[in-house]
Image (spheres, rainbow, N blue to C red):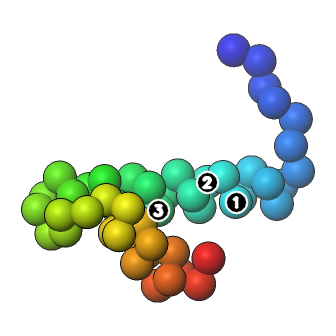
């Protein structure tokens, strides 16, 4: 797999998005929330993204 050139800002943004998505999926998996989209929205709101 080849590296895709991107700015540090873009890499950080993608990392934050992936982290939020993982956290939302974990919440759904653990049964803390029923709706993954709502969980992701709440996390974005929580972290002001």
First reached walking from the N terminus: tag 2 or tag 3? 2
**Residue 45 coordinates in the image, percent (x, y):** 50, 83
**Residue 30 coordinates in the image, percent (x, y):** 13, 58
Q: Decide if residue 23 is in sight here.
A: no
**Residue 14 coordinates in the image, percent (x, y):** 66, 52
- Residue where numbered disc 1 is placed: 13
**Are there few (<14), some (14-19), or many (20+) residues within 10 Å of tag 2?**
few
- Residue where numbered disc 2 is placed: 15
First reached walking from the N terminus: tag 3 or tag 1? 1
9 or 45: which is nearer to us?
45
Which residue lies at the image location 11% right of the left edge and 62% below the top edge? Answer: 31
Which residue lies at the image location 74% right of the left edge and 51% below the top edge? Answer: 11
Which residue lies at the image location 25% right of the left edge and 63% below the top edge? Answer: 35
Residues under numbered marks 1 and 2 in contact, where contact means CB atoms less than 8 Å apart = yes
Distance from Cα at disc 2 to Cα at disc 3: 9 Å
- Residue where numbered disc 3 is placed: 20
Distance from Cα at disc 1 to Cα at disc 2: 5 Å
Q: Say how many tags the image has.
A: 3
Q: Is residue 42 left or right of residue 7?
A: left
Q: Is residue 15 left or right of residue 37?
A: right
């Amino acid at each position: 797999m080849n590296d895709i050139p991107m700015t540090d800002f873009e890499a950080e943004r993608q990392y934050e998005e992936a982290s939020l998505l993982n956290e939302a999926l974990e919440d759904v998996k653990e049964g803390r929330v029923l709706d993954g989209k709502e969980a992701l929205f709440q996390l974005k709101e929580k972290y002001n993204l």
